Image: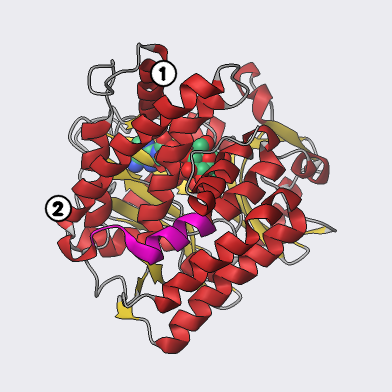
Amino acid sequence: MTTSETVGVVPEQLDRWLVAQPWYRGRGPVECERVTVLRDGDPALVHVVLAVGGRRYQLLLGVRDELPERLVHARIGTAGEREVYEAVHDPELTAALLQHFEESTEVEGLWFRGALPPRYTDAPVGRPFPGPQRNFSIVYGQRHVLKFFRELTPGDNPELVLHTALHSIDDPHIAPPQGALEAELDGVRTTFAVLHEFVPLGALGWPMATASVRDFLAGPGVDPQAAGGDFASEAHRLGRAVAGARRPAETLGERTAGPDDEAEFVAALHRRLDAALDWVPALAPFEAGLRARFDEVLASAEPIRLQRVHGDLHLGQVLRSPRTWVLVDFEGEPHGGPAERTRPRPAEHDVATALRSLHYAAAQLLVGADDVTTLLPRAARWLERNRTAFCAGYAEVAPDRRPGGALLTAVELDRAVLEVCHEQRFRPEWTVIPLSAIAEAVTGEPAWLV
Ligand SMILES: Nc1ncnc2c1ncn2[C@@H]1O[C@H](COP(=O)(O)OP(=O)(O)O)[C@@H](O)[C@H]1O
Ligand SMILES: O=P(O)(O)O[C@H]1O[C@H](CO)[C@@H](O[C@H]2O[C@H](CO)[C@@H](O)[C@H](O)[C@H]2O)[C@H](O)[C@H]1O
């Protein structure tokens, strides 16, 4: 089958299916920009790039004459007489995909670049990653994770750039990259998917930290160390891991910000606050305090060092393997467009987002609780203990960048402002978490804004 003959594999019901997908933000007519057959026959595997209202999406379609019962849940529609479905649910097709990486093939401008270790056993079965995710991933046994970006942005994806940089210095806190799928988009080489080593037996930081908080808040609450599931030693190790990710300073393009960069950096904090204030009136009482904290960055003598960062480093992006913490999903700051994702930022950005996440973990049990007065000081103690441990771990690896000062405060508050907007949109009842952190920083008093 050649490309021109394959247009018939795109299902007639595609538009209806797309608008029902949580990740889809396209508006307007859908144009099929590129169709590539990766495996012919029955089942066939087809890669599709869609263009819709200035956005690009990629799909992996499976095509069969008849759809077995086990694939009915993945059905998208029909193309002529044939059934079309999401290929990630079909192990026969995910196996074909892995083979492209193993053989480093090129199919009509789609380059599968693989650097996989030799395989001495049968191919691992590829199944869709089950958890919540923005993109879609296929897990191959305990060996590889293949992540496809739902929405495509021309150029290298930060996930690939940063993993490659950190792998070049053998950073033990990343899943080693094993390949990438690339093609040209608007004449620019673009990352479509990344292949990584699977982190076996990994536990996410968020459930670990929140279990610790739960134990601490439920117990007599005298000594965090004595409560079950103390997280502080993990927070300390995590601080070390995060500091490690800023070590290859030159690989990550580290430079000292000049006066213009600094002015622009602070102006951007104010601009984001302007936009947030328009949208969330509850921020208004804290406006003056926030602006004062932002301006303190300019008054401070600390030089700002800019570099590429993770950008969204929260406890849902860190996996505790039996060996160490592993940071995943280096796609950059998600609260903005492609330029925001790749913008060099102070290394403090990753510290700030991790510390904000510790605050979230400490505070989430207070949302809707009846006994906030009792719980608030206990949550504050858990937070203090784990913040201190994280910062101590960080400072051990990066003694020149001991976390603290006006810059860290400003970046934490900027992140909290973005979180207020994020929560307002997706989880309004959780808006109180970042808003309370802002109130506390501005007033200097413990706060819980019910
Ligand atoms: N290398 C890996 N090994 C094991 N699990 C992983 C690996 N990379 C990611 N994961 C798991 O997959 C989840 C989603 O990955 P992520 O990169 O955050 O995808 P998305 O961008 O779709 O949200 C992570 O929360 C983690 O649980
Ligand atoms: O989907 P992503 O993982 O890229 O991140 C987005 O969603 C996160 C979850 O809503 C959001 O994180 C916020 O909530 C977390 C707890 O669920 C908390 O640990 C983070 O500190 C807090 O920012 C993240 O901001 C957003 O980009």
Q: Position of residue 180 (x, y in %)?
A: 40, 57
Residue at figure coordinates x 44%, y 80% from the top left:
262
* Residue 446 painted magenta: no
Dot 1: what SS?
helix
Q: Residue 151: which quarter of the image?
A: bottom right
The answer, for residue 51, to whether it is visible in the render is no
Q: Position of residue 346 (x, y in %)?
A: 37, 68
Dot 2: what SS?
helix
Residue at figure coordinates x 79%, y 43% from the top left:
19
Q: Mark 2: give few (<14), some (14-19) or many (20+) Cα within 10 Å.
A: some
Q: Position of residue 141 (x, y in %)?
A: 34, 30
The answer, for residue 410, to whether it is visible in the render is yes
Q: How is the image coloured?
A: secondary structure
Looking at the image, residue 29 sits to the left or right of residue 220; the answer is right
Looking at the image, residue 278 sits to the left or right of residue 221; the answer is right
Which one is nearer the viewer's eye here, 322 or 265?
Answer: 265
Residue under circle 2?
Answer: 396
**In the picture shown, does residue 290 fall above or below 253?**
above
Give the residues drawn in magenta, as a range. Answer: 402-414
Q: Main secondary structure of the magenta part?
A: helix
Q: Which mark is residue 217?
A: 1
Residue at figure coordinates x 32%, y 33% from the top left:
123
